[in-house]
Structures are given as C-alpha cells and as structure tokens.
Image: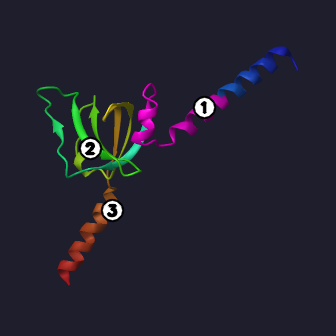
Amino acid sequence: MKPKVIVLLVLIGIAIAAIISTTAESGESSTFSEAEKNTNEVVHITGFLVKDKPFEYDPVKDPNYFVFYLKDKDGEIRKVISTEPKQQDFERAETVNMYGRADGDVFRATKVIPKCPSKYKDEEINRQAQAAKAS
C-alpha cells in the first residue's frame, strides 16, 4: 500500500474511535453527588421532576432563568437553575435529562431535555376512561 492510504486509514480509525468514545460517555447518567466531585466538568444527569416543589419562571423578568427541583437516581433532590427558557408542558415531564455543573447545593443546567409521556399512552388512558364510563 501507498503511505498516503495507510495514513488515511489510520486517521479514519482514530475518528471512529473518538466518535465511539464520546457516544459511550454520553449514555452514562451521573448523580448530584458525582457532579459535586467533578465541578469543572459538564455532567449528564437524568432524574425525576419533583412536582410538589415550586417552579420559578418569569419570562418578562428573565426568559433565560428557570428553577425547578429534580430527584436523581440515588433519590437526592436538588434545586436546578437552568439558563434556558421553560419549555411548554414541562410540568408533564416524566423524566428530565440535563447537562451542566454542580455549584454548591444547586445544579446549574446549560441544557434541559424533558421526556414527556407518549401521546399514545395518553390516548390509551383516555380510551380506558371512556370504556369505564360506558360500563
């Protein structure tokens, strides 16, 4: 083989390895206590929205300031301060994926992705309710 082809194959191999390593790391969800240990790193946390605690959002005052509470997979509840606007139907979210850093007893999220219930699940619940009424 020519040296150019060998170099090209090596570069392609390195690129593939880099892509695989970044996608493998992004799938792992941390906890708030793990985030406290790595305050200089952006971490990914998946948790459950705590709906009995208040949300703070005033789009007129500051549309990029949204506060909510999240329970991580270890059961720890923390205040989350997001630098993104509150998404429509955020309160309906079952789980929330977020990226950010720990800052003392709060978590500062730079990216928040709510996972809302499936529309098919809602339709099934509606059908069951209508069937119960008809009985």
Label 2 neighbour load within 10 Å: few <14, some 14-19, many 20+: many
Left or right, 102 with respect to 89, comes to right
Give the x, y percent position of residue 36.
41, 34
Please name the amino acid that badge 2 sits on.
Answer: Tyr
- Which residue is at a point 17% across and 78% down the rendered structure image? 133
Asked if disc 2 and disc 3 are in contact, CB closer than 8 Å, the reply is no
Q: Which mark is residue 121?
A: 3
Rendered image quadrant of residue 117: bottom left
Amino acid, disc 1: Ile
Q: Residues within 10 Å of mark 1 (few under 14, many from 20)?
A: few
Q: Which mark is residue 69?
A: 2
The residue drawn where x is 41% and y is 40% is 33
Whether residue 130 is in magenta: the answer is no
Question: Where are the magenta residues, as a range?
Answer: 16-43
The residue located at (31%, 67%) in the rendering is: 124
Residue 19's disc is 1
Decide which of tag 1 and tag 3 comes sooner along the chain: 1
Mark nearest the camera among 1 and 3 is 1
In the structure shown, which secondary structural element does the residue marked by tag 1 occupy?
helix
Which residue occupies the extreme right position in the image? 1
Q: SS at mark 3?
A: helix
Most foreground residue, 86 or 108: 108
Kind of element beneath mark 2: strand
Q: Is residue 135 above or below residue 99?
A: below
- Work out which quarter of the rendered image holds the C terminus and state it: bottom left
